[in-house]
Amino acid sequence: MAMDTFPCSSKRPCPSSSQEQNNARVVQGLDHVEQVLHKFLCLDDDDSTSSSPSPSSPCSSISLDLSLEKLLESSASDADRTVLIDRALRMGSMLLDAAKHSSRKRASKHNSLAWPLPPDLTIKVFSMLETQSLCHASATCSLFNKCAKDPLCYANLDLTSRVPKINNSVVSTMIQRAGNALRSLKLGVIPCATPLPGSCQPLVYTNRNSIVEVSNFSWNDKRSRQGRESSILTRSCLSPLSRDGGAPGILLRKLYLYNIERMDNASLGQALSACPSLLDLEIVGLHVELRQTLMSVSANCHSIERLCFESSKTGRDDSLKTQTCLELVDNCPHLTSLSLRGFKLHDYKIRVLVKGFQKLKYVDFSTSYSITGSFLRSLGSCMGGNLLEVLILRDCMHLKEVEVARFLTAILAGDFKFLLRLDISNKEGLASEGDWYHRCFNSSIMPVKQVLEARPDINLVAEYPAEGSYNDSFDTDMNSEISLPSQLSSHNSDRSIFLSTSESSYNSDQGSGNEDGQDASYVIYEESSDEIDFLSL
Amino acid sequence: MELLCIRQWISGLLPTWLSAWCIKPVGGALVRQEPEYILLALMGSPLKKIMLCSSEKEIFSVEEQVMVQHSVIINNMIEDGSYNHEESKIPLDCVDSKTLKKVIDYCTHHTHHHNDNQEDLEAWDAQFLNVDSNGLYDLLMAANYLEIRNLLDLIYGTIKNMIKGKKIDEIRRIFNIKDHGFTPEEEEQNRKEYPHFY
């Protein structure tokens, strides 16, 4: 503390001699500044302070006020008053800072006793927390704050939220902190309360339901977003993966992106080019083209094991080309799980995929358009198709009853020995042979019951609307035939819960909010009905 | 053999004999004690014991097999031959008696009951960790020092669950952490990084 800024002692109110006597013992050994400070801080205790208007008032802020006023009044000139006030402000703020600093130090010391774990063990605990809890812990005290900055804590980032509140800079900071410790990244908006990874029904419908219902989130209406600029992710939100020489992206294994409205093909492609070690890619509700995304994957992510794409433009993305499929099969031979939902897929292209991936076990083409099921023909006899463990073709509008019947017959004949789960439900019923518009609910040609008997290990789900005679008898059969989750191969740890969750989605009421989507899709069908009868095998 | 040794030998063996031939109810089913105990009892050799010395110089005698199975550090010590069964004791200056006793308790239970079903083991673990936070930290540091993998994971999981899902104030309350405020620079940085909190 600079001595020359202190007011001259002659102008200070003279403390009573008794006060000095009382404090004499305390201030022994302190130098002058500390003695003065001690006296100043003890003003509060002293009842006999002369400047106090009423002896009973203990509030020193009132007496300080008056003291300062008196001091100013007794000043010689206006200039002196200005100087005094300046000094009071400066000294006051210095004292405040010093007190805050000391308070922090003391509290830190207390905290280090309350939390005796050394930093390395603390970091170990923090690395097990999910991102949200990590942020809370980090804001608790400076010890936690320091430990929470370690890269290990950011290995698995979950930056998803129910409403948009994460912006680019948060993503950037976290990715930067992770550095090359980053292993998994989940980003975006998941409107439903509990996203159930792996169960096809909720992810397909609930996303759309919530988005249609909550008007703010209609992805068709971009204008509604303008008011929320600061808290949304822009197209370059994943560019931190490429920074620092690509260090964060290099060992990234999982990338899950949900409903990032502004992401486009180029930025997604750039992000994927930074992730050569990617094993698991899930993209839901992004406005990206299937073909371009798959091309990026086959160009960059050769180790990929799981691909899950859900279209944001259900039924309208027809971009997939045979060439893309061939390249994907060539460049990504390790794929075991493939989900393409809500795209327009053609049987001959799908056949390339399903036959081509030698390790493919899990296939989900729910809510796809155009596929009739002919890609399943003779699949059981060849290498690529025979290893299938899960096949989900739920609510595929053009899935033909005859093709499904053929498939079930193949199962009865002994093909698809590894099949554990088959879902051919359709809330509209299946398409009949000639005219897809004509729906079949009560099929005498589908040997469902026989399959259930011959292959009790298969969890066969074939739910059709109540108009047919299927629903009642099937519900009871289904419950008794449900295989335990442990029987399924968990090629992906997330998948292990999907069986129990899909049980809850059996009610045929699921698509209640979907009427809008359906009406729109009927319009599309009219336009493209010519394309359906193309397949000749 | 000296008298002392014989007595020790018998007293060491007696519980083994008794338990080897007793049929113990374990987890609702009647289970015989493990074959190796019966074999040892028949062979007549005492179970090898090792001595652990806490920071308070208290000596704990534990079955060698129990500690070797759980603690990497002790396993290494025994394997490389630096431990002499007749004379030496393993000094654990970082671990006090109370904590050491608990650690031995954990290892012994898990060795003898590793065939139990998962739920029983988990229930026992939950009961075991029903200590105050200081005890928990001491256990964690002891497990870390002795490198007892499953106990470490258990305690990490417990502490993680204490933090998980809690708000900032709750975390402070649970761990008795004083809110001292951050420096202005830290405060600014916090605000920038976690805008969705403020």
Image (cartoon, coloured by chain):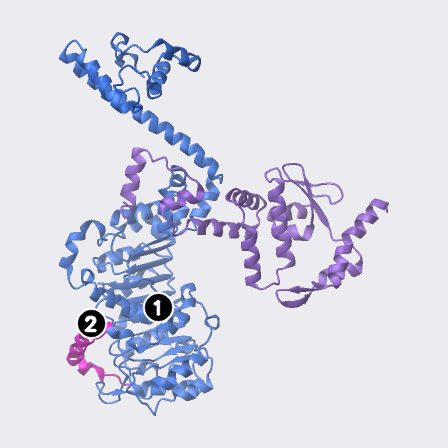
Chain colours: A blue, B purple
**Quick one: quadrant of the C terminus of chain A?**
bottom left
- Residue A520, given in percent of the width and then of the height, sits at 17, 74
In primary-sequence order, the first of circles 1 and 2 is 2
Please name the amino acid that badge 2 sits on: Arg
Q: Is residue A225 visible?
A: yes
Mark 1: few, some, or many residues within 10 Å (few <14, many ≥20)? some
Q: Position of residue B17 (x, y in %)?
A: 77, 59
With respect to residue B79, does A33 lie above or below? above
| Image quadrant where residue A439 sits | bottom left
**Which residue is at the far top?**
A10
> Can I make out residue A179 in this image?
no
Residue, far bottom: A444
Q: Is residue A458 above or below residue A15?
A: below
Whether labels 1 and 2 share one chain = yes
Q: As drawn, is A486 to the left or to the right of A210?
A: right
Identify the disc placed on residue A456.
Answer: none
Name the residue nearer the viewer: B5 or A258.
Answer: B5
Q: Say which amino acid is labelled 1.
A: Asp
Q: Residue at x 30, y 75 (%)?
A: A350
| Quarter of the N terminus of chain A within the rendering | top left
Q: Choose between A418 and A9: the one closer to the eye.
A: A9
Q: Position of residue B103 (x, y in %)?
A: 60, 48
Circle on res. A330: 1
The numbered dot on residue A316 is 2
Chain on which label 1 sits? A
Q: Which residues are magenta?
A: A513-537
